Image: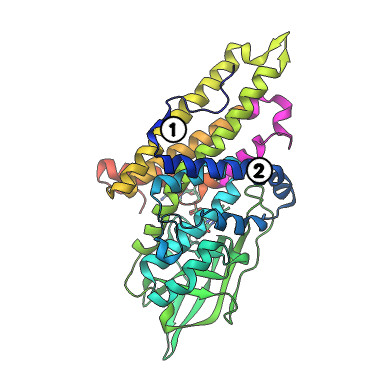
């Protein structure tokens, strides 16, 4: 019997009953409700918005946020497993869930006042509201410290001006967490849909993450109330603390994409006949399958250990960089090898390969590019910062 779903080191036995249940729930959801429709959404460049409420019902938004605010009160390993299973379906859905939970609910829970928490967190958790996170600007991606978006204090609140770009969920969002400078210091603001001067035009023409909505955020003399600032967090550590949460989820998510292309490759290699035998019987094809299994297994162990460190409260952001960097790279390499194993069929929409490969190109870039994570790790090893 060929090995289809890789759990070569019996990672499942290291999970609690609750963790396995969460994994299996999301796995079934992806099999039943995502895989049958996702390729068409990718082709049509549409987001499967009908799944937002389902994700809320199944507890995928803000699973680690306390239950009193509508979150799941689960541990970080559960969150990781949710990301892994979702991304086995498509990186777009995992991106939407990462943004909602890690980049919108997390900062609102940690940094916003009690009224804003009570107003937004339960609705975001249930999927009745969608959120987005605006950090990147047209001229400031890897270097957000240069951001031009700014806030001016008035008697009644703050007036925001600036443009954000590449914002996941932007045009769909009911609420945006926007980062801008007040008196030269990076601060976080809550901007609600419908606020005069705020618009979120969708960006078109992506060859990657086509089933995800990506937008600009335009702030033109956009006035928000005094209460809509994160009062106590100042500087880049605010947005970076959110990115650490999201990058953690991505390091699990990428494993899901790798599993999807591995599963397809094993099935293909054991059934596709060339030279009178399955191509999986050729050593060169086996070498690729072994590489994939090897790297998926290492990535699984890395993610699980990272999750346990996170739940113990000892995880460092640099450890997240290592896992995000490694796991996304390995998933992209798996997708490329899978494309090769599938021959010409590898480019067809009948197989998930090109969709995952194209998606992973974005995943490699967002939430800190592969190279920026290399530099973060380089600085951690040497004590010498090579990127500023
Ligand atoms: C589909 C998608 C969704 C996204 N969603 C969001 C979102 O929801 N919210 C948000 O705020 N942002 C989002 N982003 C933006 C993303 O975080 C940025 O694209 C990313 O930070 C990189 O910035 P950049 O594209 O401007 O590239 P740049 O920073 O211009 O980098 C270009 C290249 O230069 C390299 N480089 C840059 N600086 C250095 C250096 N010092 N040393 C060596 N190499 C360097 C980079 O590694 C990269 O290879 C999204 C992006 C994509 C593609």
Q: Quadrant of residue 285?
A: top right
Q: Between 1 and 97, which is closer to the camera in this rendering?
A: 1
**Looking at mark 1, is its residue's CB closer than 8 Å to ligand 1?**
no
Instruction: State the quadrant of the N terminus.
Output: top right
376 sits to left or right of 346: left
Rendered image: mark on residue 179: none
Q: Position of residue 51 (x, y in %)?
A: 64, 55
Q: Does dot 1 land on a helix, a strand or a loop?
A: helix
In-front residue for pair 98/322: 98
Residue at coordinates 49% horizontally, 78% vertically from top-left?
Answer: 160
Judging depth in this view, the residue of 110 and 22 nearest the camera is 22
Mark 1 and mark 2 residues within 8 Å of each other at the beta carbon: no
Which residue occupies 54% across, 82% down?
221
- Where is residue 198 shown, x and y percent of the image? 58, 76
List x then y, in percent, for residue 81. Answer: 47, 43
As displayed, is residue 326 above or below residue 165?
above
The residue nearer to you, when weighing 96 against 187, is 96
Q: Is residue 184 magenta?
A: no
């Amino acid at each position: 019997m060929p090995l289809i779903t890789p759990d070569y080191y019996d990672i499942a036995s290291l999970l609690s009953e609750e963790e396995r249940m969460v994994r299996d729930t999301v796995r079934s959801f992806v099999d039943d409700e995502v895989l049958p429709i996702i390729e068409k959404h990718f082709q049509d460049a549409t987001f499967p918005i009908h799944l937002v409420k389902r994700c809320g019902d199944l507890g995928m938004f803000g699973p680690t946020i306390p239950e009193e605010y509508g979150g799941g009160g689960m541990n970080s390993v559960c969150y990781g497993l949710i990301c892994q299973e979702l991304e086995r379906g498509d990186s777009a859905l995992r991106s939407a869930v990462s943004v909602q939970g890690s980049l919108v609910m997390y900062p609102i829970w940690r940094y916003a006042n009690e009224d804003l928490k009570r107003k937004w967190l339960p609705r975001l958790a249930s999927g009745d509201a969608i959120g987005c996170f605006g950090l990147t600007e047209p001229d400031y991606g890897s270097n957000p410290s240069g951001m031009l978006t700014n806030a001016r204090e008035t008697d009644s609140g703050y007036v925001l001006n600036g443009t954000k770009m590449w914002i996941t969920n932007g045009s769909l969002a009911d609420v945006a967490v926007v980062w801008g400078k007040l008196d030269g210091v990076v601060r976080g603001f809550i901007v609600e849909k419908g606020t005069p001067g705020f618009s979120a035009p969708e960006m078109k023409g992506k060859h990657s993450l086509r089933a995800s909505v990506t937008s600009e955020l335009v702030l033109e003399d956009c006035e928000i109330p005094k209460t809509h600032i994160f009062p106590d967090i100042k500087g880049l550590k605010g947005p970076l603390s959110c990115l650490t949460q999201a990058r953690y989820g991505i390091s699990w998510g990428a494993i899901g994409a790798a599993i999807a292309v591995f599963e397809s490759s094993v099935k293909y290699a054991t059934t596709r006949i060339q030279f009178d035998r399955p191509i999986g019987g050729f050593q060169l094809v086996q070498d690729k399958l072994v590489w994939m299994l090897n790297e998926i297994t290492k990535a699984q162990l890395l993610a699980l250990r990272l999750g346990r460190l996170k739940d113990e409260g000892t995880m460092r952001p640099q450890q997240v960089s290592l896992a995000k960097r490694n796991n996304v790279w390995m998933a992209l390499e798996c997708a490329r090898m899978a494309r090769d194993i599938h021959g010409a069929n590898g480019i067809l929409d009948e197989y998930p390969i090109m969709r995952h490969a194209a998606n992973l190109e974005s995943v490699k870039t967002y939430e800190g590019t592969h190279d920026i994570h290399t530099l973060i790790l380089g600085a951690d090893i040497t004590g010498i910062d090579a990127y500023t």
